[in-house]
């Protein structure tokens, strides 16, 4: 049965979608069967793999509210070798609908339950806020990867996220684990970035992944071309980092 991993952080601008997309593409490059779930109404993960979010006839929204089946919503992205549950602004309405029903937090888990055996890894790109969509992702997941930008407020944002994870573990999903904290946008020439990186290791120890994603221009450019970094520039430092991350996740979670 495939492992479901949420890529989440309640703080925006930390490389969450970049990580979800490029980790998914890297795992697919390593011959894993991968499903990428875009659970952010901004639809950035969808766009980042070359799918036009404005032209979607159906999306993860219809799946969550029970108007469509999985096979009607999923797309295969040939270039990246992965499957995608796409999203667009319609997903905003799903949050309201899910708040009104008792099973709201468990909708995604129910939707993915029957297809988990088809994949080695299911990665969920979460919204940058704590809302019903994020709760759905954490309830559906076995693990969570937390991208953390090495900057001044990094630890403050993590504290709120850890509280959320603990609440979900207690009330909705006792099996949820932290698969790792991922240091992103790291500039080793920056003393503050190095200090924050060291603080993360000091506070969280083995929960901090060994892989560090550097600040990389090519990595920032890739989404505008609708390509993961492995397609856009496989020789870049960003691509090398995400291939290393994929290998680390495989070793750590046995997917």
Image (cartoon, rainbow, N blue to C red):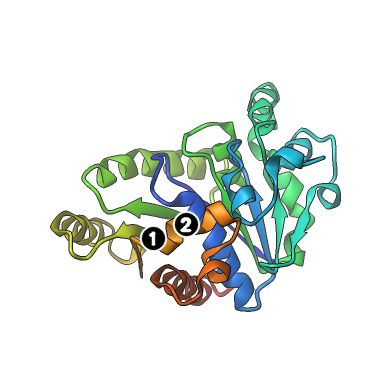
Left or right: where 96 falls relative to 158: right
Q: Nearest the camera: 236 or 82?
A: 236
Q: Where does the C terminus fall, quadrant-wise?
A: bottom right
Q: Nearest the camera: 162 or 233?
A: 233
Q: Nearest the camera: 185 or 30?
A: 185
> Relative to 136, is 124 above or below?
below
Q: Where does the N terminus fall, quadrant-wise?
A: bottom right
Which disc number belongs to residue 221?
Answer: 2
Q: How would you rate the neighbour count of disc 2 (Cα within 10 Å): few for under 14, some for 14-19, many for 20 or more?
A: some
Q: How would you rate the neighbour count of disc 1 (Cα within 10 Å): few for under 14, some for 14-19, many for 20 or more?
A: few
Q: Could one spot residue 126 in this view of the protein?
A: yes
Coordinates of residue 175 in the picture (x, y in percent):
55, 54
Read off the residue under disc 1: 217
- Check if mark 2's residue and mark 1's residue have beta carbons within 8 Å: yes
> Relative to 234, is 209 above or below?
above
Which disc number belongs to residue 76?
Answer: none
Q: Could one spot residue 6 in this view of the protein?
A: no
Identify the residue at image location x=58%, y=32%: 132
Coordinates of residue 195 in the picture (x, y in percent):
16, 58
Identify the residue at image location x=70%, y=55%: 84
Secondary element at tag 2: helix
Coordinates of residue 44 in the picture (x, y in percent):
57, 45
Left or right: where 12 falls relative to 34: left
Coordinates of residue 224 in the picture (x, y in percent):
54, 52
Query: What is the C-alpha distance between the residues marked 2 and 1?
Result: 6 Å
Q: In which quarter of the image is residue 96?
A: top right
**Number of numbered discs present?**
2
């Amino acid at each position: 049965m495939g492992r479901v991993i949420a890529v989440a952080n309640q703080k925006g601008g930390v490389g969450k979608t970049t990580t979800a997309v490029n980790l998914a593409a890297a795992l697919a490059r390593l011959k894993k069967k991968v499903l990428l779930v875009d659970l952010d109404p901004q639809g950035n993960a969808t766009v980042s793999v070359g799918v036009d979010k404005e032209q979607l006839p159906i999306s993860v929204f219809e799946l969550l509210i029970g108007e469509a089946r999985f096979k009607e919503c999923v797309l295969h992205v040939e270039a990246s070798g992965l499957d995608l549950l796409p999203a667009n602004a319609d997903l905003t309405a799903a949050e309201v609908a899910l708040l009104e029903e008792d099973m709201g937090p468990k909708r995604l888990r129910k939707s993915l339950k029957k297809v988990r055996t088809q994949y080695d890894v299911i990665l969920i790109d979460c919204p940058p806020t704590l809302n019903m969509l994020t709760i759905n992702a954490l309830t559906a997941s076995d693990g969570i990867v937390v991208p953390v930008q090495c900057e001044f407020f990094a630890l403050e944002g993590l504290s709120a996220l850890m509280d959320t994870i603990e609440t979900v573990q207690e009330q909705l999903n006792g099996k949820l684990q932290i698969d790792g904290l991922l240091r992103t946008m790291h500039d080793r020439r920056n003393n503050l970035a190095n200090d924050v990186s060291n603080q993360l290791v000091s506070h969280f120890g083995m929960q901090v992944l060994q892989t560090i994603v550097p600040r990389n221009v090519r990595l920032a450019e890739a989404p505008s071309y609708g390509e993961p970094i492995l397609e856009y520039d496989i020789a870049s430092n960003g691509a090398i980092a995400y291939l290393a991350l994929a290998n680390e996740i495989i070793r750590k979670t046995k997917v």
